[in-house]
Image (spheres, helix red, strand yellow):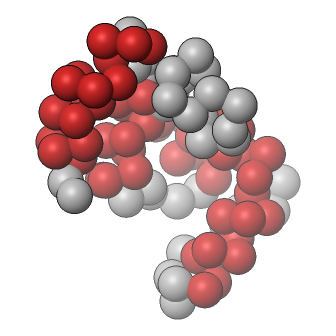
Amino acid sequence: MSIESAKQFHASHVAPKLGAPVGATPDDVEALERRLGLPLPQSYKDYLLWMGRDYKGIFRGSAWFIDSIYSNKETLRSLLEEAGSRYVLKES
């Protein structure tokens, strides 16, 4: 499913009940990339811009928001390793 398909589904089925999603700003995403020391995949940036601050939306209660990413750094490190990524997170 593409992000556009997901957005259409959300607009039709989720937004009428929970409202439009709240996204992170481009500055938020750029700051996160600087802090992590790696560029994020475009699809993930698209997600963050779409609903990266949607705390009352469909993912409420989860840690899928832009403010949760850095605290999940060990999980991110594991995912990058598992995917065979060449990116190495900065130690900080």
Q: Is residue 82 visible?
A: yes
Query: Which quadrant would residue 91 be assigned to in this image?
Result: bottom right
Residue drawn at (69%, 41%), measured in percent from left and top? 63
**Rendered residue at 31%/41% (across/down):** 46
Name the residue rendered at 40%, 51% in the picture: 44
Q: Can you say whether 22 is above or below 49 in the image?
A: above
Q: Residue furthest right?
A: 92
How far from the left and from the top, in percent, is residue 73?
A: 75, 57
Q: State the image coordinates of residue 57 (x, y, percent, origin top left).
A: 51, 21
Query: In the picture, which quadrant includes the N terminus?
Result: bottom left
Left or right: 39 in relation to 10: right
How many numbered marks, from 0 up?
Answer: 0
Q: Quadrant of the C terminus?
A: bottom right
Compare residues 29 and 19 and report the one nearer the observer: 19
Q: Is residue 76 left or right of residue 34?
A: right
| Of 35 and 79, the residue lying toward us | 79
Left or right: 65 with respect to 63? Answer: left
